[in-house]
Image: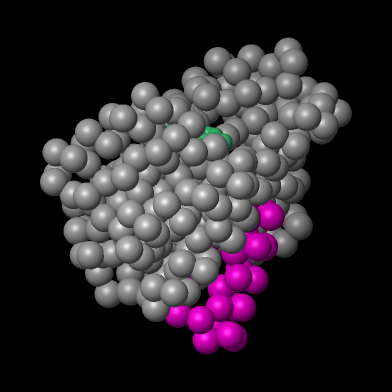
Amino acid sequence: MEGFAGKVAVITGAGSGIGRALAIELARSGAKVAISDVNTEGLAVTEERIRSIGAPVKADRLDVTEREAFELYADEVKAHFGKVNQIYNNAGIAFAGDVEVSSYKDIERVMDVDFWGVVNGTKAFLPHLIESGDGHVVNVSSVFGLFSVPGQAAYNAAKFAVRGFTEALRQEMAQAKRPVKVTTVHPGGIKTGIARNMSAAEGIDVEALAKTFDKKLASTSPEKAAQVILDGVRKNKARVLIGNDAKALDAIVRLTGSGYQRLFSGVIAKALPNTH
Ligand SMILES: NC(=O)c1ccc[n+]([C@@H]2O[C@H](COP(=O)([O-])OP(=O)(O)OC[C@H]3O[C@@H](n4cnc5c(N)ncnc54)[C@H](O)[C@@H]3O)[C@@H](O)[C@H]2O)c1
């Protein structure tokens, strides 16, 4: 993929944060964009920003957990633009709670959105990406797809699963000589609404958690995150790390092996309010 001009790009979770910034940056780079979200108000703001750039945009309400709707949507996007080159499976939710106090429902909900949403998007669009002759799947995991921390078992599980799924897909596409590149994205702390929109197990002070995230952990703007992702897509990187925090954490995990667990749990315990 040389540039984005004339390419058709699909972005889920485009009503806020990284998804909105990605959609705008892609539109500025000459792409035609299909944006979706469950948050239709936020999506309308993104749509308006893209229209003001003068780029072609198709905006739809789409819940990434609804598999049949996703399949129909993929065909609609193809019919609308005539082809589809890229999908950014970005939609996601956060959840806080130790395993002991998280319900099955809580854990399943995170897996449904953060993992199955990515699988649904990948599978629904893959035939169209192959057909385009120049496709790219971009799946958003997290630094929490590289290492685990207490209170994030459900989110960790979903983001590790996204990484496993996406890294296998990249190798499969290369082996089968399919014209589809595949990139996994691992953002560090990005200044978005993710922590404010988070849900949590009973008794957890979400507001305090969100405040700590906003003040201490979110260091990169969504616009910068979008630029780093698109640079990685241009260079066909297998893995994109966003932010110095992500790079440092990745290095520590690789250097210490499982030893990071002892290091991080102490740091997290100090930095974050209890999640149990
Ligand atoms: N912000 C961070 O620090 C950070 C770090 C690592 C990974 N991520 C990941 O980046 C991605 C984008 O998150 P963000 O930080 O921009 O958060 P955000 O909350 O600003 O945006 C996420 C968007 O996804 C949408 N969404 C949620 N559930 C959905 C569903 N079922 N169907 C369709 N849309 C849905 C939300 O309405 C929202 O607009 C997520 O996958 C998140 O896990 C974020």
Whether residue 103 is visible: yes
Quarter that holds the N terminus: bottom left
- Residue 155, percent from left and from top: 67, 40
State the scheme by which the image is colored. one colour
Return the residue nearer the eye: 75 or 60.
75
Work out whether 165 lies above or below 47: below
- Residue 264, percent from left and from top: 67, 43
**154 sits to left or right of 37:** right
Work out whether 47 lies above or below 254: above
**104 sits to left or right of 123:** right
Residue displayed at 29% across by 35% down: 46
Residue displayed at 74% across by 29% down: 106
State the extent of the magenta-drawn residues as a range. Answer: 159-187
Residue displayed at 62% across by 47% down: 67
Quarter that holds the C terminus: top right
Return the residue nearer the eye: 259 or 81.
81
- Residue 21, percent from left and from top: 32, 43
Return the residue nearer the eye: 81 or 54.
81
